[in-house]
Image (cartoon, grey):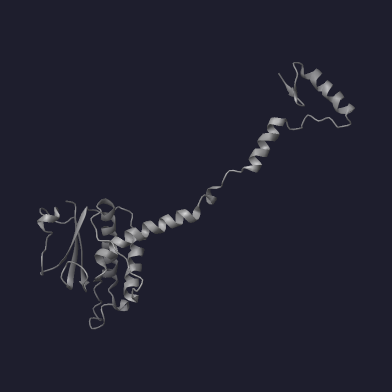
Amino acid sequence: MPWINGRFYANPIFGRALERAREAESGRVWTEERPEPELQLSSQTKTQNPAPSPTSRHPQGDQADHQKAIEKKASAGYGETRGLLPQKSADAKKHSPYDRTTWDKDSFDELQEARRNIMDVSDRNPRVRRTRPGEKANAIEESVWNDNKNAAANSGGELPGNHFFIRQAGVGPQRPPKKAGFGQTGDPVRSYGPFINVGGGDAPTGKHTYIDIYDH
């Protein structure tokens, strides 16, 4: 049944004629294009309550959550490797180990990948040492923290292993202790190094530090 000018009519021709007469009597101009009440209400509701755009849905909250996730991963890498430095380039052996301009680029890149691997392991195994620089951190500590945040930003969970062990070649234990519950049989699935260990962890200090990754 047609709906004409706010009323139902069984005969549309009769309905249009009647509505024209009513509009003429009231001094208004007849039109069949006038929106019906239901459509007007729907349009007003949409205007008053527009749907939120995808870009307006808590962008600041999402960014803050992303930053927290990066810093959580970075705390694992920093807690386990803050005493490790890359090897120095061949022509800079006498310089300070903290002088970044003398670091071997390939060794630095390998250390960053080792950190990412430890961070990926930390997603699967919570038994990691997490920490971050304190309020009185020095420039060296802050720079190492930034290295770990950069590594964390590129940590996607694709690197292997469920455990890791840091050792000094030829000094101290070369495998995890039995009480660790891993690394007693078979070889590591991946090894990184050598790096320079200036201290701060369980492995002895030295210039031949390795990070071994184990599945079990």
Residue 98 sits in quarter = bottom left
Left or right: 128 in relation to 135:
left
Image spot of residue 205 (x, y percent) = 17, 73
Q: Residue at the front extreme?
A: 135
Q: Image height check: is 110 above or below 22?
A: below
Q: Work out which quarter of the rendered image holds the N terminus and state it.
A: top right
**Residue at position x 37%, y 59% from top?**
70
Left or right: 178 in relation to 105:
left
Query: How many numbered discs?
Result: 0
- The answer to whether residue 110 is seen in the rendering is no
**Residue at position x 34%, y 58% from top?**
72
Residue 71 sits in quarter = bottom left
Residue 96 sits in quarter = bottom left
Image spot of residue 87 (x, y percent) = 24, 73
Residue closer to the observer: 158 or 48: 48
Q: Residue at the bottom extreme?
A: 94
Image spot of residue 26 (x, y percent) = 88, 29
Q: Image height check: is 90 above or below 39?
A: below
- The answer to whether residue 128 is seen in the rendering is yes
**Residue at position x 68%, y 30% from top?**
38
Image spot of residue 59 (x, y percent) = 50, 54
Residue closer to the observer: 187 or 3: 3
